[in-house]
Image (cartoon, helix red, strand yellow):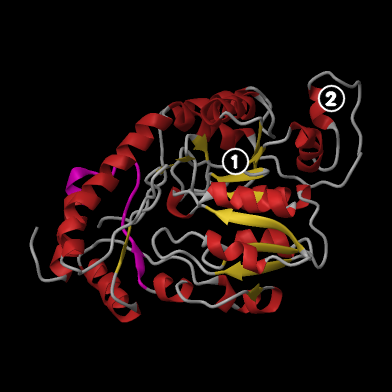
């Protein structure tokens, strides 16, 4: 059986976890938290990176740091995970969903400006499959209207847009290190802060509303409760698991890209015959091979395709059910404009197995199974 996903595991992880345990400090903000943070800053060029308990909690922090209040509106794609919207709803604000581009599955930047009202406070740009949104346009709109930009770069670690790491372009960026991501700590994430004036508040928010981070740096002689906050700090055990992956980030990236490129080359003839569609990566975008998807003709064909792949012992899955059609989306948000592509394209998309150290034999099995669905051989 070719599994859809296998979490990254490196031998060094066990040794680092042992070191974390023996240090007698496993609650977070110890040696491995600092090492991971330093490596992420080095890799992204970010002003400030704070590890979090999840990508969802990173989004929660970003929403709080944007000062979202009840009745405010945040423009986002409907084709995203619930966490993007939950962070907004948590503040009493309203997610305003807009349609996507059918090529990248990202929000259609041309539809943002028409969705802006006097209540709009932010734009949540979701970089689907690690392929960047059109950030120049988004940042220009935000500047003209005085809006904050949250980059949901949960899938975008090691991706970039015109030479800039995803997550570092908007006001706040959010990474995920969930077990399904390219780099994982089981459950975990990071929030990236562009403007240093937000650094101290972010630290306080992450440390249960206390100035504990300043205390650990020796800047104050005791710490206390100074503002609203919560517990967004991951344990040292999670960070110790992540750290060797960050050290081997390029190796992991290259290995995943090998699989992505092999799939793309193998399936290009099928696309040329009009049997399926392949991912599109716009000029100026460098992706991270987070997802390899194909698009079938319609929902009926996709259902048959997934069943066929399962019968051929290959795990495949579809992705998001558009949020505006979900029960909570109908309750808490609204869709601006017309849903031309969101539902239609989401019903055609199916993801193929892609993970670190996917074997040559497994790649071949996936490719042969796809070809056999169309009654062909490679």
Q: Position of residue 95 (x, y in %)?
A: 68, 67
The label nearer to you, 2 versus 1, is: 1
Q: Position of residue 326 (x, y in %)?
A: 58, 77
Please, what is the dominant secondary structure of the magenta stretch?
A: loop
Residue 258's disc number: none
Residue bounds of the magenta highlight: 348-362
Front in this rendered view, residue 15 or 364: 364
**Badge 1 density bin: few <14, some 14–19, many ≥20, Cα 10 Å:** many
**Badge 2 density bin: few <14, some 14–19, many ≥20, Cα 10 Å:** some
Q: Earlier in the sequence, mark 2 or mark 1?
A: 1
* SS at mark 2 in the image: helix
Residue 305 lies left or right of residue 285; in this view the side is left
The residue beneath circle 1 is: 169
At horizontal 76% and vertical 41% (from top left) the residue drawn is 206
Which quadrant holds the N terminus?
bottom left
* SS at mark 1 in the image: loop
Please indicate, yes or no, whether residue 57 appears anywhere in the rendered image. Answer: no
Front in this rendered view, residue 329 or 164: 164
Q: Position of residue 2 (x, y in %)?
A: 26, 55
């Amino acid at each position: 059986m070719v599994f859809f996903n296998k979490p990254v595991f490196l031998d060094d992880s066990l040794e680092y976890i042992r070191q974390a345990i023996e240090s007698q400090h496993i609650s977070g903000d110890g040696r491995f938290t600092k090492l991971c943070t330093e490596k992420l800053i080095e890799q992204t060029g970010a002003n400030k990176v704070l590890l979090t308990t999840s990508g969802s909690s990173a989004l929660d922090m970003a929403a709080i740091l944007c000062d979202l209040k009840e009745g405010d509106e945040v423009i986002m794609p409907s084709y995203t995970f619930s966490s993007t919207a939950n962070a907004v709803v948590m503040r009493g604000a309203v997610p305003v969903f807009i349609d996507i581009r059918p090529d990248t599955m990202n929000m259609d930047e041309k539809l943002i400006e028409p969705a802006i009202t006097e209540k709009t406070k932010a734009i949540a740009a979701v970089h689907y499959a690690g392929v960047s949104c059109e950030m120049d346009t988004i940042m220009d709109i935000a500047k003209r209207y005085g809006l904050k930009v949250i980059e949901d770069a949960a899938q975008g670690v090691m991706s970039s847009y015109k030479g800039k790491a995803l997550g570092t372009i908007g006001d706040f960026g959010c990474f995920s290190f969930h077990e399904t991501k390219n780099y994982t700590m089981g459950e975990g994430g990071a929030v990236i802060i562009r403007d240093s004036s937000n650094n101290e508040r972010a630290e306080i928010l992450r440390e249960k509303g206390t100035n504990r981070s300043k205390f650990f740096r020796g800047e104050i002689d005791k710490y206390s409760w100074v503002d609203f906050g919560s517990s967004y700090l991951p344990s040292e055990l999670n960070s110790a698991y992540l750290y060797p992956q960050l050290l081997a980030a390029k190796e992991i990236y290259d290995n995943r890209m090998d699989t992505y490129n092999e799939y793309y080359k193998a399936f290009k003839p099928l696309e040329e015959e009009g049997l399926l569609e392949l991912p599109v990566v716009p000029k100026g975008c460098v992706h991270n091979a987070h997802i390899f998807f194909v698009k079938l003709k319609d929902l009926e064909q996709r259902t048959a395709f997934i069943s066929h792949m399962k019968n051929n012992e290959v795990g495949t899955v579809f992705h998001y059910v558009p949020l505006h059609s979900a029960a909570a989306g109908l309750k808490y948000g609204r869709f601006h404009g017309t849903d031309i592509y969101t539902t239609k394209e989401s019903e055609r998309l199916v993801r193929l197995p892609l993970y670190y150290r996917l074997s040559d034999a497994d790649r071949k099995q996936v490719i042969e199974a796809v070809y056999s669905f169309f009654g062909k051989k490679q």
